Amino acid sequence: MTDSRSRTFDWTDPAAALQQTRSAGTGLEALRAMIAGSIPPPPIAQLMGFALVEVSEGLAVFECTPAEFHYNPIGAVHGGLACTLLDSALGCAGHTTLGAGVGYTSVDLNVRYLRPITHASGLLRATGRVVKPGRRVIFTEGELTDAEGRVVAAATSSLLVLASGG
């Protein structure tokens, strides 16, 4: 018999949050509003237990403390958590460079896993930076560090700018 555990979470209607994001001003202003709590976080952040904690022009930082519910069958945190944190940080870094009503989508994401992640890794910090902004394509890079400051994963991404916001 297995030792069953459960977890619940709440989220806000993503369509309503999207409308708030689109009317908040520039990408940087919208993300600052999310940090301040006037725009709710997206459901994926609630589900996986991570949060946007810092933004500035060309920079976005997310944090997450890995837990049992992030584990895969081989006793480590699933690589999808690292990938999701990096995708979020790199995408939001690009978003900080966009004007009001302008959106983006990932064209590619290349993640390199450098160290295993477990609950003992402590607070994970995903930092995304814009390497080259653009009107059509934005290039980004970043890394995921553990509580000791060791890089556990690194990534690059290209983002396609969507002039209509979505």
Image: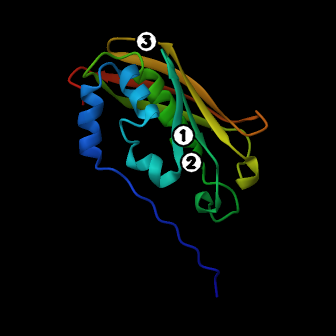
- State the image coordinates of residue 116 (x, y, percent, origin top left): 73, 48
Position of residue 61 relative to residue 76, above or below, is above
The answer to whether mark 1 and mark 3 are in CB contact below 8 A is no
To which residue does mark 3 refer? 133
Q: SS at mark 3?
A: loop
Amino acid on which the number 3 mark rests in the picture? Pro
Q: Position of residue 42 (x, y in %)?
A: 39, 44
Where residue 158 sits, quadrant-wise, is top left
Q: Disc 2 marks which residue?
A: 81
Residue 17, position as x, y percentages in the image: 29, 40
The structure residue drawn at horizontal position 51% and vertical position 31%, both measured from the top left corner, is 89
Label 1 or label 3, whichever comes before in sequence order = 1
Q: Quadrant of residue 38?
A: top left
Q: From the top left corner, tell me how far across and down residue 59 is, in percent.
A: 52, 20
Q: How far apart are labels 2 and 3 at the CA level?
A: 26 Å
Residue at 49 percent across and 16 percent down: it is 58
Cβ–Cβ under 8 Å for marks 2 and 1 = yes
Q: Nearer the viewer, residue 10 or 146?
A: 10
Q: CA distance from mark 1 to mark 3?
A: 21 Å
Q: Label 2, secondary structure: give it.
A: helix
- Residue type, numbered disc 2: Leu
| Quadrant position of the N terminus in the picture | bottom right
Q: Which residue is mark 1?
A: 85
* Category of crowding for the residue at label 3, using alpha-carbon neighbours closer than 10 angstroms: few (below 14), some (14–19), many (at least 20): some
Q: Dot 2, how many residues are within 10 Å of its Cα: few (below 14), some (14-19), or many (20+)?
A: some
Q: Give the Cα separation between the discs numbered 2 and 1.
A: 6 Å
Classify residue 37 as left or right of residue 141: left
Q: Pointer 2 and pointer 3: residues touching (CB < 8 Å)?
A: no
